[in-house]
Amino acid sequence: MSEKLLEVKDLYINFYTYEGVVKAIDGVSFHINEKETFGLVGETGCGKSVTVRAILRLIPTPPGKIERGQILYKGVDLLKLSDEEILNYRGNEISMVFQEPMNSLNPVFTVGDQLIETIMVNQKKSKDEAYEIAIDMLEKVKLPDPDKIMGKYPHELSGGQRQRVVIAIALSCNPSLLIADEPTTALDVTVQAQILDLMDDLKQKLGTSILIISHDLGVIAETCQRVGVMYAGTIVEMADVENVFEKRFHPYTRGLLNAIPVFGEGKKKRLEEIPGSVPNLLHPPSGCRFHPRCPHATAVCKERKPELVEVEPGHYVRCHLYG
Amino acid sequence: MQFWAKFKAEHESKIKELRYTLFLIRNSPLTVLGLMIILTLVLVAIFAPYIAPYDPEKTNILERLQPPSSKHYFGTDDLGRDIFSRVVWGTRISLEIGFTVVLLAVAIGSVLGLLAGYYRGKVDEILMRITDMFFAIPSLILAMALSAALQTRNIWTVMLAVTFVWWPSYVRIVRASVLSLADSQFVEAAKSVGASDLRIMFRHILPNSLAPLLVQMTLDLGAVILVAAGLSFIGFGAGPHTPEWGRMVAEGRNYMTTAWWMITFPGLAIFLTVLGFNLLGDGLRDVLDPRLRR
Amino acid sequence: MNLREYIIRRLLLAIPTILGVTFIVFFISHVVPADPALVWAGGARARPEQVEHIRELYHLNEPLWKQYLIFLNDLIHGDLGVSPVTGRPVITDLKTYFPATLELTIFAITLAIIIGVPLGVLSAVKKDSAIDHFTRIFALSGYSIPIFWLGLLLQLFFYYHLGLVPDPGGRINTQIYTSGEFKTYTNMYLLDSLIQGRFDVFCDALMHMILPGFTLAYATAAIIARMTRSSMLEVIRQDYIDFARARGLPERIVIYKHALRNAMIPTVTVVGLSFGGLLAGAVLTETVFYWPGIGRYMVGTINTLDFPALMGGTILIAVVFVLVNLMVDILYAIIDPRIRYG
């Protein structure tokens, strides 16, 4: 049984904006084991990015506020750390890669500068030592001519190269957890496959756990062992990837997976869609946030928010249909 | 009645946009303040003959250098003229200069900018070189040089000189708008239906460049008044009796230590006027910025 | 293309601009006046023989294009004409007065940057705080206030009422000047006094310069503060700033190394462009403070009707402006590597 590397417990996050309070994260709980790839999937705006940024305390605190919850990393509650203490974790223990690689690198500094700087700050190495580690990382991400790349500016590299550099920076200090927020969305399809392979390869070599966020079910299916489905700020289903895809306990999961067109499966079949639209989190629906769009909604769904229940071993669902 | 209904229907979305713009303006206190200041000044300028208690050019040596009092709100100058009345009449002059220069500069600059941006090629090159030449000389300096060459000292010289300095910036602004719009799809669509160049320029491109133009015009109204006041201060502008604010400050300079009111009030008038235009211009810029709407 | 090629290219581009400036000045001085000879000879004061003499001297009977070539030729040889008032070549007068203006403007721009940049950065980092509101009010007043009025008010307050600064009208105490001990090499007193190790003279010159310098700097500081603020706000929103934090860099480094460097790029351009306003402001400031520089020299021509002096000053200022913009463009390319690549 692998150890729980990261455990998020009952996370509630609000944003106090001009128009009112946005209840963005409404009770999120999940855990990631060592050496595993965990996926967080859901539509745009469901709170995946916010949840994940909370781990590294990257949420601007006004207007955001972490109302309650715990984020336990190797036993330590990250939310209770001071601003200086969290710096020790960022880059060192937990790293994050953002969606658009072209925007993650500072355009006025060379790629090498940014890589070395990260290593020097996090690992307290000298410039020469950092340089060696940097070259090694660039080789690990399969970039040819690492010496040359070090001296280049971000705009001189292609999108795929930049994403590799960003991954190199993220992994340069040997973190135990890598968070990847839509790592392939901004890339061409062919490059996508390469990057995903690379990430998997590095995971094997370095023993890192990966938390991948995506709205692309294909990416999730390919890379993750376990997955959590998010809707309107909460996790509605969580289990091993095969189980979620096959069993689809939660109505939302069902709707999501049914909406994928499948080739050859009866040409006359209409594309199923989930009626209604994503709720406004300023005034979220009462009880279960999915009830207005759920074909199986009952009175209790409107009144009370369902608990996350372990329906089968390792398979959690948050729905009144199951308990 | 029928005409009105038809007009509303045709322009429905534009009216909605306008309403939203007004809503945003109303919600920005600084912008409203700027607008209030400007409206007050315009009213003062229009009703100057009724507001000013004295004739601005009438001298009265017996009452010279009087401090502010209930008889002379802003005091009197070295020739006994009532400063309050002069400041009030000066509003007319400043606003006249401002509006004339900006409207002329916009007219000239827009036409040239449209041509440059739309036809590009040689026309564009030449116009760009010319505007570059103008931009290389600071505004006040160029205005000074032209005023001196024109040999006369009056408000018209000031207006001409400042217009001469100002038109190139509008060429640039309009050209930039045109360049970004000329490649857009609706222009291509218009072309494909056979619209003439002129029609495209005036009916399609110009209305869409209006927003940045309006902002710049408002801000420039303030800037022009500042330059004109500067010109008058150093003596290149208005004649000895004209109640132009810049000139009044210059006149008050010799008496500044004993009669502080002579420089304070005209200068304050310039400051408030320019402030008003800047507040309004800034506010409009924020309101019309497409990224901040919705 | 690398940095060196970029510099050379920009240098070459400056030449047609300067040429264009000469063309505009030529147009104003030779084409606009009804009778250029009359104006060049000193306007209404000139006697008919003087006017004819000027007409001959400057070949004003020749066709316009020939006049322009002669004009250019003179310029290249440093001949800006002779002042009908002083009888000296204009260029000599300009050389005398230019260092004072140069010193004042350099002082002012330095002051403007020292005030403007930190205010802009702080106001962006602490958005909507007290310092943010203060900066925005400061910036707004800077654009709106007539510089000559500000100068007069400051003079009234700090000199006449408080006596904190010395008598306007000089750059240093006249006794120092006349005692002959103090040598002037560059005619820029702050520099000269430092070279000679005369700290007392330095302080004296500084005290004389502080009021006009601040007046001149005010509007530019406002522009710089505002530009820095808005570009910092833009930059802080960028993904690479988020990534810098996510990598574990302390906030200090994120803001002052990563954000600032990017935010400075548009600010540098603005500083260059506002130098033009600074030169124009120098004219007004020098008039108010009786500062013996080019600006005051040019303003004086109104009464003396010294047209050649005015034109000479105009060309000089324009050339300085072009050169400053050139330097700014090069600085820009040094800071932002993306520009160098065509």
Image: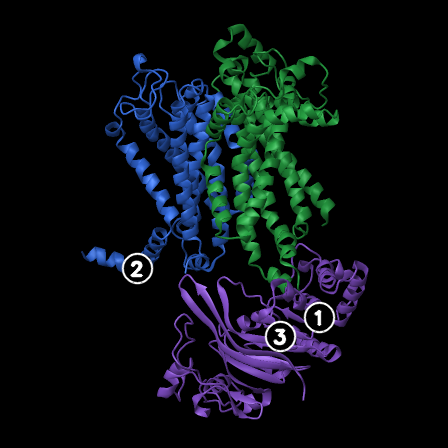
Chain colours: A purple, B blue, C green
Q: Quadrant of the N terminus of chain A?
A: bottom right
Q: Secondary structure at mark 2?
A: helix
Q: Which residue is under mark 3?
A: A189
A287 in relation to C93, above or below: below
> Which callout, 1 or 2, points to the residue nearer the camera?
1
The residue furthest bottom is A312
Disc 2 and disc 3 in contact, CB within 8 angstroms: no
Q: Position of residue C31 (x, y in %)?
A: 51, 23
Count of number-bearing discs = 3
Quadrant in the rendering for residue A141 = bottom right
Question: Residue at the spot x=68%, y=49% of the render?
Answer: C340
B118 in relation to A250, above or below: above
Q: Secondary structure at mark 3?
A: helix
Question: Residue at the spot x=55%, y=82% of the render?
Answer: A228
| Label 3 to label 1: alpha-carbon separation | 23 Å
Q: Position of residue B21 (x, y in %)?
A: 36, 54
Q: Is residue B3 left or right of residue A233?
A: left
Category of crowding for the residue at label 1, using alpha-carbon neighbours closer than 10 angstroms: few (below 14), some (14–19), many (at least 20): many
Q: Which residue is under mark 2?
A: B12
Quadrant in the rendering for residue B34 = top left
Category of crowding for the residue at label 2, using alpha-carbon neighbours closer than 10 angstroms: few (below 14), some (14–19), many (at least 20): few
Q: Nearer the viewer, residue A233 or B109?
A: A233
Q: Chain of mark 3?
A: A
| Label 1 to label 2: alpha-carbon separation | 56 Å
